[in-house]
Amino acid sequence: MLQSDFLPISAFSKMSEVPRKTLIYYDSIGLFKPIFVAENGYRYYHRNQLDTIGVIHIFKELGMSLEEIREHLSHRTPDSTLELFHKQEEIVYSQIQKLQRAKQMIIQRAENIRQSLHMDTTRMDVVWQDKMPLLLSSPVRSCKKQFPEELWSDFQKRLQREHAPLGYPTGVMIDKEDMLRCDGDWMTHMYSRMETFHYKQEYMPEGYYLVACARADYGDTERIFPPIFEYIRKHHYTIIGHAYEEYMQDEVVLQNPEEYLVRIMVHIEKPKGI
């Protein structure tokens, strides 16, 4: 072992980016010891120990306690290390999925805000919508004003299993049959726009949608639907699918609930002239 490979604690601390006090603490609890200690008490480390301190840092970042790390290092073998690496690989994969979902949430919320800035609550428009992947809740038939707690709880568990963070945008679906009866007060599912990992992948079908938006608090959208049904009747549109109700500006964006901006998209047959 060449003495030129020895590093005093200050140099090792700088190279490993681990504070000097932390290295001393690791030594005191038997987690990570210097290669030798001089008579004056000064600690020296070997360059090869940079690999070990790097692994300790990663394990700590992934949630292992110092005691768990110490226990592993004290009895490490190729088999036990391989098993531990496999477990940590699963943890890393899970964290990557959570970060990806967090990124999706930020992008989706930002896009909702951008779109909402150009929405006109005084008009309705027909737009083409591409096929959109969705996560759906369990089926339910419930009045939107009497939002069932068990549905909310169930959907939050689904979002959690899909590694989606709290605050991920959600909406509600109104069934085609209710829309054909000119009844927009009932919902059949909650939904979020995402590709799923664990639950069955559902989709918002591609096609033409009549889009209306209005200022309304959560669950206070029943007044928006009569004008939608009248507009559909007046323009001889044909409803061929569900309606999708989603808040583009909500409590994350606005302080006054009465100013929340909701968008409703109704799947219709291709209008004549388009």
Image (spheres, rainbow, N blue to C red):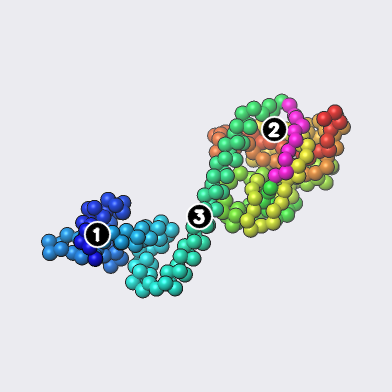
Number of numbered discs present? 3
Q: Earlier in the sequence, mark 2 or mark 1?
A: 1
- In the depicted structure, whether residue 150 falls above or below residue 263: below
Q: Is residue 14 magenta?
A: no
The alpha-carbon separation of the residues under discs 1 and 3 comes to 36 Å
Residue visible at 47% across and 62% down in the picture:
88
Give residue 68's quadrant in the image.
Answer: bottom left
Left or right of residue 17: residue 223: right
Q: Earlier in the sequence, mark 3 or mark 2?
A: 3
User: As shown in the figure, which amino acid type bears the numbered disc 3?
Assistant: Gln
Residue 225: percent from the left, percent from the top?
A: 76, 36
Give residue 170's quadrant in the image.
Answer: top right
Quadrant of the image containing the C terminus? top right
Left or right of residue 1: residue 272: right
Most foreground residue, 185 or 125: 125
Residue occupied by mark 1: 5
Residue 257: percent from the left, percent from the top?
A: 59, 36
Residue visible at 69% across and 53% down in the picture:
201
Instruction: Assess whether mark 2 and mark 3 are in contact (beta carbons under 8 angstroms).
Output: no
- In the depicted structure, whether residue 86 falls above or below residue 265: below
Choose mark 2 or mark 1, whichever is in front: 1
Q: Earlier in the sequence, mark 1 or mark 3?
A: 1
Q: Is residue 129 magenta?
A: yes
Residue visible at 21% across and 56% down in the picture:
8
The magenta stretch is 123-132
Residue occupied by mark 3: 95
User: As shown in the figure, which amino acid type bears the numbered disc 1?
Assistant: Asp
SS assignment for the magenta stretch, majority: strand
User: As shown in the figure, which amino acid type bears the numbered disc 2?
Assistant: Cys
Question: Is the residue marked by circle 1 packed among few (<14), some (14-19), or many (20+) residues within 10 Å?
Answer: few
Residue occupied by mark 2: 213
Q: In what element is the residue under mark 3?
A: helix
